Image (cartoon, rainbow, N blue to C red):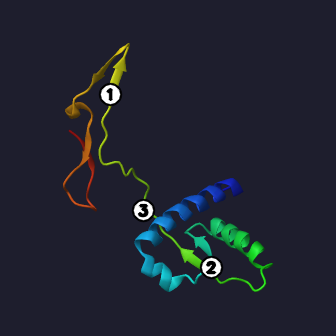
Amino acid sequence: MTNEQYEQLNDQLSSEFLLFTMEHSSWAAEHIPAGAIVVFQTDDEGFNAWAREAAESGWRTEKPPRPMVLVYLRLRPQRSRIVRADATLVSGAKPERLSRKQTSVHQSSKGRHGSRLRQR
């Protein structure tokens, strides 16, 4: 991977981790000291080395250095969070609304882990 790809991955991990810490504030308070530098680690050794080096390059110059925490993340496969979609077909000057039966997508009732999208 390139440095640009590592930066994009780090940005994605940062966004996901922010959501996680908002939902699990007690975990964050227990594991991450105030003002700490958080360095994300994944299953990608190349990314891990890049992230740690990027964090340590600025950290070495701090007097006194802030705490640094390695946070190991594993993400679920990315999937859409959309729970409903409707569409309007526009042809010429007259918009025509399609019926929900034709366009809506809803989650089935199989439960959180076994859910799948189906078209109605």
Mark 1 vs 2, N-terminal side? 2
Quadrant of the rendered image containing residue 58: bottom right
Residue 35 badge = 2
- Separation of disc 3 and disc 1 at Cα? 32 Å
Categorize mark 3 by other alpha carbons within 10 Å: few (<14), some (14-19), many (20+): few
Badge 2 amino acid: Gly
Callout 3, which amino acid? Arg
Please state the horizontal and vertical placement of residue 73, each as a whole percent of the image: 51, 71
Q: Residue at x 45, y 80 (%)?
A: 27
Looking at the image, residue 94 sits to the left or right of residue 34; the answer is left
Residue nearest the viewer, comparing 49 with 26: 26
Which residue sits at x=49%, y=79%?
28
Element class at badge 2: loop
Which of the labelled discs sits on residue 74, or is there none? none
In this view, the residue farthest toward the right is 61
Label 2–label 3 contact, CB within 8 A: no
The amino acid at mark 1 is: Thr
Residue 34, percent across and down?
A: 59, 82
The mark found on residue 76 in the picture is 3
- Left or right side of 8 for 116: left
In this rendering, the answer to whether 42 lies above or below 118 is below
| Among the two numbered marks 2 and 3 on one chain, the one whose residue lies closer to the N terminus | 2
State the CA–CA distance, disc 1 to disc 2: 49 Å
Residue 88, which numbered label? 1
- Which x, y percent locates residue 110? 20, 57
Q: Residue furthest top?
A: 92
For the residue labelled by badge 1, is the local secondary structure a helix, a strand or a loop? strand
Query: Earlier along the polypeptide chain: callout 3 or callout 1?
Result: 3
